[in-house]
Amino acid sequence: MTCCLYDEVVPSALELTGVGENGGRFISHSNKYLLYAYHLLQNANGSQCSNISIDKWVKFWSKKAIKHHSPPPCKEKKTVRPKSTHNPLGDIATHERWSTAKEALFAKLSIEGSLKEEAYLAAYLACWLCTFILPGKDVNSIRPSTFKISSMMVSG
């Protein structure tokens, strides 16, 4: 099965700021922040029509050092089991405080304190969707059509 998401995703002002009868927003906060981040990256490229690469998207959002480096080269020993497989432990650590670089990013995007994790996770999920789940013709670029999907995934 091959299909493409419709990439015309410029929401109206009513969608960005509107509230329904039940008091819920039409578009989640994280979607608004993802669109704003995408807009900032496009302006940095100097063109409103340019695609944003996955690499630029990750560098924009990720301010941490690399956690898992490449494993060292090893020789295959068929008789002895390796002492280390270089796999992460799989433990999920408690959330650390945001670094000053991340706080500066959130301030640049005007992200409120309680929405930082939601926006950060939505940005990661948008990247994941574009790379592995819904790859498009331009495999190495972020598509804004995935922002609403990732925001919905984050909010449940």
Image (cartoon, rainbow, N blue to C red):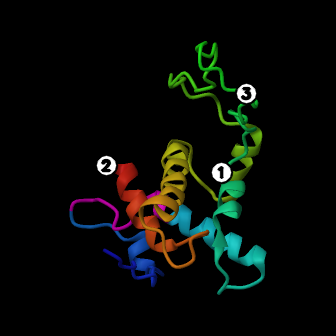
Magenta span: 22-31
Q: Secondary structure at mark 1?
A: helix
Give the Cα distance between marks 1 and 3. Answer: 41 Å
Closest to the observer, 148 or 12: 148
Q: Which marked residue is nearer to the observer: mark 2 or mark 3?
A: 3
| Residue holding disc 1 | 106
Residue underneath mark 2:
156
Residue 79: x and y in percent read 59, 14
* 136, 27: nearer the viewer: 136
Q: Is residue 30 magenta?
A: yes
* Circle on res. 91: none
For the residues bearing labels 2 and 3, Cβ distance under 8 angstroms: no
**Pointer 2 or 3: first along the chain:** 3
Query: Residue 123: x and y, percent?
Result: 54, 56
Local crowd at mark 1 within 10 Å, few (<14), some, or many (≥20)? Answer: many
- Mark 3 element type: loop
